[in-house]
């Protein structure tokens, strides 16, 4: 049996490539290979033509398997990519006659929606390592595939909905992921010498904006949700990857929360420098930022951490998404990391419920006060079954507006957030610094900067929440090119310095100065790797 994985995503790619190696697909592929099945993977880019994708499918099915009609076509996609994905699904299903299914997060949380499409034969829900192997074994042997757990199938009698199987308990027992499935040059991180590693399954947090509580609820009673690879197994994976590619110069742990456990973290901090010794980065939560933990990160070679702050607005952060972290806690944590010489990237989430234009401005000013090294913007993905989606849908109903998450998601993906957020964080940072030396000038410039925040590209949902919840009046924002030019002229050097700072805020990585020259090529401007926007937009003004 051969499984062809097609990855259609406008979100998880940069410069036409994947951001990083995908542990989920690589782990499933390794299990399929171990069971005697074949696999292939293709990234479907936004500018790919249908005949190119079809030619790849026909070439793969013909060159590596004899039983052509038993080849299975698997899609992985996020909800906001469905408009781009579904035409490909239907056309390929018609052109090739292959059994076609969906796996991944959106298929797991929205199986009815996905299965309703005429080009989809089945959906796979949850963890796929054991489930997909069993499905392929059944297809090879002529067994009853409709009884395989974790899958929903279309049948002549309707939809067959099989239950989820218990979660994998011993993740160390899985074969090493198939990192060769996608060549390094097709992944931005690996191409730049940054090895992506996953050490944990199932986030222990219950953030109401995330898919994690939804998935945890689906699996309730089917085993422990949070599971760790042993430190020894993680180090084995890293050493095996470095042996194949000695040019790797950084490791990034892509767990939702890295080293969440005292015993695990102590063993890792003790063993990693001696057994691997490559500088690394990771994702953390604010509560982990204790002096002892940060010192362990520093001693073991951590150079960059990423932390989900989500909003600079205290109201949004604590009353809407229940993060439960005060600005003082964040400031204290960032100070610890700075003292340890560890750079901090903060995540900012846009499009959250109750985010008015006024609170958007509050969020910008809040991030400016924190002064992180980098800020990565993400747009809230409304996961079916989540508490936050339920509250927002209810608010929309009270306002007499039909909630259309798909349409709203598409509206959020325009340049409004991604172009201007970093710029205004940089401007507010510069204003805060100026206030200490030139308070009157800083006050005048603050009025001008407030007035020039652009809302012409604001998503429909944000505009619909135009009234601030406390003041009950619109967050009036001017949009006048003459006013923007005036602000630039009055600000002078201040304005140019803020634009230079914007490039660093928008960076994905800042290459450590003591690690030799930074990677060159796509996405890099000097020692920083910037996001998907054009380089010209990030160059300091002349």
Image: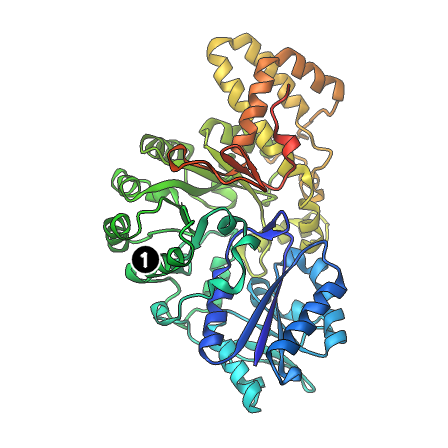
Residue at disc 1, secondary structure: helix
The C terminus appears in which quarter of the rendering? top right
In x, y percent, where is residue 337? 35, 35
Q: In screen coordinates, is 181 left or right of 260?
A: right
Corner quadrant of residue 111: bottom right
Label 1 crowd bin: few (<14), some (14–19), many (20+), radius 10 Å: some
Q: Nearer the viewer, residue 440 or 335?
A: 335
Q: Is residue 166 visible?
A: yes
Name which quarter of the figure residue 500 lies in: top right
Q: Which residue is mark 1?
A: 235
> Where does the image place residue 336, in percent across and percent down from the top left?
32, 33
Residue positioned 58% across, 34% down in the render: 359
- Residue 10 in the image, given as x and y percentages of width and height: 65, 53
The quarter of the picture where residue 493 lies is: top right
Residue at position x 28%, y 61% in the image: 232
**Image height check: is 339 above or below 274?**
above
Q: Residue at x 50, y 61 (%)?
A: 214
Q: Is residue 321 left or right of residue 157?
A: left
Q: Nearer the viewer, residue 471 or 352?
A: 352
Q: Is residue 254 visible to us here?
A: no
The colour scheme used here is rainbow
Q: Quadrant of the N terminus?
A: bottom right
Residue that protrudes farthest toward the bottom in the picture: 142
Instruction: Check the image and report above or below for 409 versus 106.
Output: above
Task: From the top left corner, tell me how far across and down residue 66 is, in percent.
Answer: 62, 84
Q: Is residue 455 above or below residue 183?
A: above
Count of marks placed on residues = 1
Does 131 sit above or below residue 230? below
């Amino acid at each position: 049996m051969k499984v062809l994985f097609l990855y259609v995503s406008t979100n998880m790619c940069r410069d036409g490539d994947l951001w990083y190696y995908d542990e989920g697909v690589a782990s499933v592929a390794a299990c399929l290979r171990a069971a005697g099945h074949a696999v292939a993977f293709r990234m479907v880019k936004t500018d790919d033509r249908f005949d190119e994708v079809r030619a790849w499918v026909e070439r793969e099915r013909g060159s590596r398997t004899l039983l052509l009609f038993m080849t299975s076509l698997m899609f992985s996609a996020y909800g906001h990519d469905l408009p781009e994905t579904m035409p490909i699904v239907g056309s390929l299903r018609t052109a090739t006659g292959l059994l076609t299914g969906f796996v991944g997060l959106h298929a797991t949380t929205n199986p009815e929606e996905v299965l309703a499409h005429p080009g989809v034969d089945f959906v796979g829900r949850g963890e796929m390592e054991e489930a997909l192997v069993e499905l392929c074994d059944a297809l090879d042997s002529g067994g009853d595939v409709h009884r395989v757990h974790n899958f929903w199938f279309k049948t002549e009698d309707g939809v067959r909905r099989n239950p989820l199987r218990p979660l994998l308990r011993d993740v160390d027992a899985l074969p090493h992921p198939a990192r060769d499935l996608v060549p390094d040059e097709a992944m931005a991180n690996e191409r730049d010498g940054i090895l992506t590693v996953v050490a944990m399954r199932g986030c222990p947090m219950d953030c109401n904006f995330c898919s994690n509580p939804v998935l945890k609820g689906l699996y309730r009673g089917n085993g422990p949700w949070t599971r760790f690879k042993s430190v020894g197994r993680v180090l084995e994976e890293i050493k095996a990857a470095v042996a194949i590619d000695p040019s790797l110069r950084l490791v990034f742990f892509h767990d939702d929360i890295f080293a969440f456990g005292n015993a695990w973290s102590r063993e890792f901090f003790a063993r990693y420098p001696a057994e691997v010794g490559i500088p690394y980065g990771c994702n953390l939560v604010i509560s982990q930022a204790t002096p002892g933990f940060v010192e362990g990160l520093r001693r073991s070679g951590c150079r960059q951490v990423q932390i989900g702050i989500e909003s600079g607005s205290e109201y949004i952060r604590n009353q809407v998404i229940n993060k439960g972290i005060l600005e003082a806690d964040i400031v204290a944590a960032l100070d610890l990391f700075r003292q340890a010489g560890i750079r901090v990237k903060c995540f900012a989430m846009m499009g959250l419920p109750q985010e008015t234009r006024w609170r958007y401005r509050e969020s910008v000013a809040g991030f400016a006060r924190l002064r992180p090294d980098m800020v990565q913007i993400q747009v809230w993905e409304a996961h079916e079954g989540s508490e936050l989606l339920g509250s927002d849908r209810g608010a929309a109903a009270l306002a007499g507006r039909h909630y259309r998450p798909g349409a709203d998601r598409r509206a959020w993906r325009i340049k409004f957030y991604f172009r201007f957020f970093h710029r205004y964080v940089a401007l507010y940072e510069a204003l805060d610094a100026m206030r200490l030396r030139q308070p009157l000038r800083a006050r005048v410039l603050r009025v001008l900067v407030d007035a020039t925040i652009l809302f012409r590209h604001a998503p429909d949902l944000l505009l619909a929440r135009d009234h601030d919840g406390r003041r009950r009046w619109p967050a009036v924002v001017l949009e006048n090119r003459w006013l923007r030019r005036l602000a630039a002229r009055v600000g002078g050097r201040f304005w140019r310095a803020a634009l230079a700072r914007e490039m660093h805020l928008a960076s994905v990585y800042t290459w450590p100065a003591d690690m030799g020259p930074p990677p060159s090529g796509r996405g890099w401007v000097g020692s920083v790797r910037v996001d998907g926007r054009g380089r010209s937009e990030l160059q300091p003004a002349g």
